Amino acid sequence: MKTKALPMLPHLKLTNLIYIIAFFTMQLQAQSNSHINRNELLNNNWPPIDAEWYYEIRPQPNCFPCLVSYQNLSIVGDTIIQSKNCKILQRLNAFELCENMGTDSEFIYQTNDTLYWYNSSTENFTILYDFSAEVGDSWEIYANNCSFTVTVDLIDSLFISNKFRKVLHISDVYNYFTGKIIENIGHTKAFFPKDIFWECIGVGCDSDIIDTLRCYLQSDTLVYKWNVDPCDTSYLITGVRDIETVEISTFPNPTNDFIYLNITNDALIGFEPIYYRLLNLNGQIVKTSEVSNHKRINISNLVSGIYFFQLYDEKTNFIFSNHKILKL
């Protein structure tokens, strides 16, 4: 495979050069995505540190106007809990939902074909996915101080990213987690059984819902995509045929001092003022402010590294855009 030589970058600090090399190394690693196979499971490497999911947030019936957006899940690091090497999964919702499970981070780890999830209420791990299960097999999932049983009704496969992947069709009597689990990708409706949390503590919820996996990525490369829209698409439904898609990009990326916003349509009219925030990989907000008219943001005072950039409405906390920025 031929590789392109990097252009000469004069007068760069050593630390900046290191970040540039790391950034482009991540892009090259993404090209090896076709070599992902079942050994990931057996080597306990799934999900990898660079895994990322986008789930669609759909509005309740009879809303007007209706906001359709997304939930972003990403593996941002690792930690040790009860001697288990766990991945830290960060959850970012486009706006506040009843599915909020009491924390913005979850902890998961895998042994052989089984993915375990840490229950902070009981301080124990529970089985979330069992990729080795066969038709008729079942397992119990504990959430808060409640539990329910899922059963495998059917097994088939899908050809995704140059390989056949096992698909478990599961169900439970409460429909907390009824749906499909794709091997090395996850549940196609919601990564976690969200509804049980509120029912377990006896609280009603009628907010918008998470329903449908839009995208799964590794090393910023698509492994699974449900439709043609960008993974982080948000749009406003104001009528049967009136849908405004929010198309937002930032440039340059990577950058050392300024980032500029490019908004390609008028979908944000009515939401002014719009705010932005930058979060580090631990989910901490390091910079936030109102977007100025010239749509230029100064990040020269930030420490070099990777950040999540979010554009949002302060009143509803609705997130219009969420993606990564590399600060040199």
Image (cartoon, helix red, strand yellow):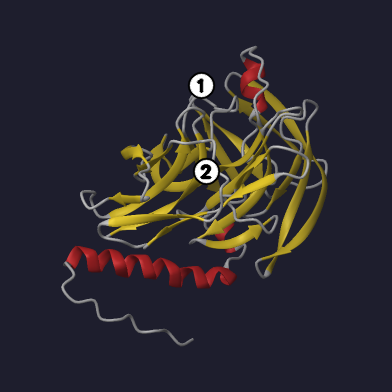
Which label is found at residue 205? none
Near-viewer residue (122 or 202): 202
Q: Which residue is mark 1?
A: 121
Q: Circle 2 sits in a helix, a strand or a loop, which is it?
A: strand
How busy is the neighbourhood of tag 2: few (under 14 within 10 Å), some, or many (20 plus)?
many
Res. 28 image quadrant? bottom left
Residue 301, placed above or below residue 140: below
Q: Whole-percent x and y of residue 86?
A: 45, 43
- Alpha-carbon distance for marks 1 and 2? 33 Å
Q: Quadrant of the C terminus?
A: bottom left
- The kind of residue on which mark 1 rests is Ser
Give left or right: position of 54 versus 130: left
Residue at 49 percent of width and 31 percent of height:
317
Q: Circle 1 sits in a helix, a strand or a loop, which is it?
A: loop
Q: Whole-percent x and y of residue 314?
A: 45, 31
Residue at 33 percent of width and 66 percent of height:
22
Mark 1 or 2, closer to the camera: 2
Query: Which tag, 1 or 2, sits closer to the chain's start?
Result: 1
Residue at 77 percent of width and 30 percent of height:
175
